[in-house]
Image (tube, grey):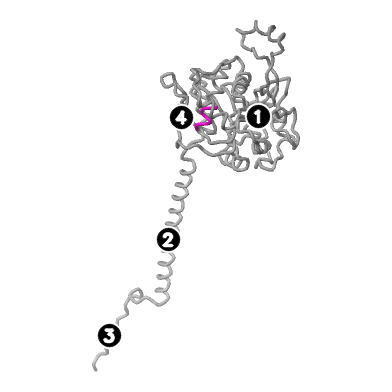
Amino acid sequence: MPSSPKSYALPYARYPSPFATRRSTLSLLLLSALLILFLFAVVSLIAQIRHNRCINVHPRSVRVVWEHAANANANAAVGVGDGERHKVMGFVGIQTGFGSAGRREALRKTWFPSDHQGLQRLEEATGLAFRFIIGRTSNRGKMSALHKEVAEYDDFILLDIQEEYSKLPYKTLAFFKAAYALFDADFYVKADDDIYLRPDRLSLLLAKERSHPQTYIGCMKKGPVFTDPKLKWYEPLSNLLGKEYFLHAYGPIYALSTDVVSSLVALRNDSFRMFSNEDVTIGAWMLAMNVNHENNHELCATDCTATSVAVWDIPKCSGLCNPEKKMLELHQKEACFKTPTLESDDK
């Protein structure tokens, strides 16, 4: 009897079932989708990094080289940056020194934002840009501390001029020339680091329509013409003649229109008469240039009101008395910090 043909059962894997085929296909599709998502995420991340680099490609802190003797051109103020003047309604330079780290810390806890985003929001809301203004010193320890602060906050303009109290008129002139080189502003504001400033009110003040292109805005006072110690012997004669006073702004804050600052920039340094006091020096220059004096006592308010622009302890102190403490106390008052333009109202 012939034997029946043998049957061979091959292993199961040799003949995959339809279900296994479908599972394999789904796995491949899922793996492909995950790979595509991963690549998309990587591309997005790279794009975001490049975008952020573009935003911060030029630092806010700028070192300004200003009129060395070998190059006495009055237009020699040069900013290390993109070379373009940043357009704003007003530029506010907060004058500070090497012994004022505590004041700067108090300011950054109150109306002066301590981060780029905060400064950007404040600039967009008010049309004003803000930087600390400081010179240089031969003290390596102080310069090292300054460089660390610059690296952390990036909110300075560094002037290539010696930082000394007796040299404040020279620093002020250097500030206006540097500010004009870096910013295309309608007004340039000099402010000290020991006043409580209200940026939204300052913005409203500078935005007012004015018929005079050359304007000097400040809380005005009358002071002696002859404040230089070498000229003190003239004062009795001046008093008898009734010519002992002229109008000028208190030093803690004042603003010059762009036409005034452009005139200062066009003049050589050695053409200016420097007095011992910075505010008197500026006042004398404004008198010589025959600019329009705009007297505004909201720039020297003793407390926050609906209209006050700058708050300080006039006449007791040339700024806030004990500014590091008083700055924080003022910022606790709703009338001071509650403004429609500041994002930091919840401080």
Asked if disc 1 and disc 4 are in contact, CB closer than 8 Å, the reply is no
Kind of residue sitting beneath label 4: Val
Residue type at mark 3? Lys
Residue for point 46% across, 53% down? 44
Height in image: 176 above or below 340? above
**Which disc is residue 217 wearing?**
1
Q: Is residue 101 magenta?
A: no
What residue is shown with label 3? 6
Which residue is tagged 4?
78
Give the camera-side residue of 129 and 89.
89
Residue 97 spot, x, y in % from top left = 57, 22
Q: Nearer the viewer, mark 1 or mark 4?
A: 1
Is 180 within the magenta? yes
Sort mark 2 into few (<14), some (14-19) or many (20+) by Cα contacts within 10 Å: few
Q: Are marks 4 and 3 in contact (CB under 8 Å)?
A: no
Distance of label 1 from label 3 (alpha carbons):
112 Å
Figure quadrant of residue 326: top right
Mark 2 vs mark 1, foreground winner is 1
Residue at (40% x, 67% y) in the render: 28
Between disc 4 and disc 3, the foreground one is: 4
| Magenta stretch, residue numbers | 176-181
